[in-house]
Amino acid sequence: MNRPAVASAAAKHLWYQSVVQNGANTAAFIGSAHNILSSGKSAVTLREDFCGTGLISLHWLRTDAARKVVMVDHDPEPVQAGAAVNDWRSEEIGRATICIDDVLSVDAPSDATCALNFSWCAFLEDDQLLRYFRHKKQTTDVLILDLYGGPEAERVGKWPQPCPGGVYVWEHTEWCPSRREVKAAMHFYPTPVASSPVTPEPLLGAFTYHWRLRTPEHTVELIKQAGFELVYLWEEERTPQGQGTGAFRPNPVQHFNKSSGQWSTMITAA
């Protein structure tokens, strides 16, 4: 990835996509999970709730010329940024339906719906989240979410990581253990260019969040209350040395391993 100029309005979205998202792998996972949970039926239409720049949708379309997407986000800014920074082809645009609206107000049906990058955690109250899950039960065959947690993640702190063109920092600015609510921010620090006399400005608070990080057990309970019957948490298989293999296996919630200091998982429901 080329490092974006900080002056660009789309810079933060390019940074975000480079450090947080892998559109190709995510699209492949969604297709595979749907196939498993639907007895071999292939998904055609993907709905991406809280779609942001729509990177997952774009890769979904590129894997099969018959596929379609419904992209839903209440905020037009990241959707417009995605159109500017990602190389959408005219025929791909023709297979995409974009809805700038509340996810609960759009009833477009789909084979699969994803709400990823922990976006669904913005539903702070259980009744709000249950309403969302019931809406999904009525409009989609398979729901895909993600979730993170663990003692090392459930606290105030900063987690810096190198990324293409610099360093990004994930920060928990507030943590409420009684409600498992977190306020978080992403910061990006570009690496200075030796040939340039200008020191690039960091993107501080490029993205901010207020989430409720429910436990896996609580999340699965609400999903089942909404009417989904098959709910799995997917764990990456590891070598005896503890290295990830890139292959994931589904487990019921009672077999999910939360022993590590930080964990993350994909959740599927059908």
Image (tube, rainbow, N blue to C red):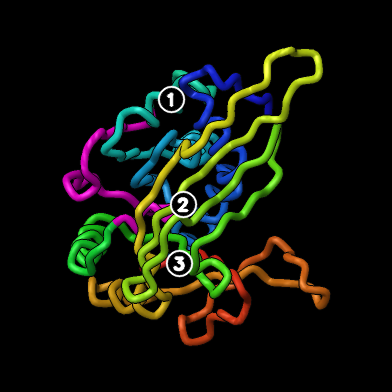
Residue 11: % across, % down: 53, 25
For marks 3 and 1, give the CA distance: 28 Å
User: Residue 119: which disc?
Assistant: none
Q: Determine which quarter of the picture holds residue 211.
A: bottom left
Residue 179: % across, % down: 32, 72
Name the residue at 48% across, 24% down. 10
User: Residue 117: which disc?
Assistant: 2
Task: Please say whether residue 139 is one of the residues in the magenta stretch.
Answer: no
Three-letter amino acid code of the residue under disc 2: Asn
Comparing marks 3 and 1, which lies closer to the viewer?
Answer: 1
Nearer-the-camera pick, 54 or 175: 175
Q: Mark yes or no: residue 70 visible.
A: yes
Badge 3 density bin: few <14, some 14–19, many ≥20, Cα 10 Å: many
Residue 2: % across, % down: 68, 24
Residue 87: % across, % down: 54, 22
Nearer-the-camera pick, 141 or 167: 167
SS of the residue under disc 2: loop
User: Residue 81: which disc?
Assistant: 1
11 left or right of 244 in image: left
Magenta range: 95-122
Badge 1 density bin: few <14, some 14–19, many ≥20, Cα 10 Å: some
Q: Earlier in the sequence, mark 3 or mark 2?
A: 2
Q: Which image quarter is the C terminus in?
A: bottom left
Residue position for label 3? 267
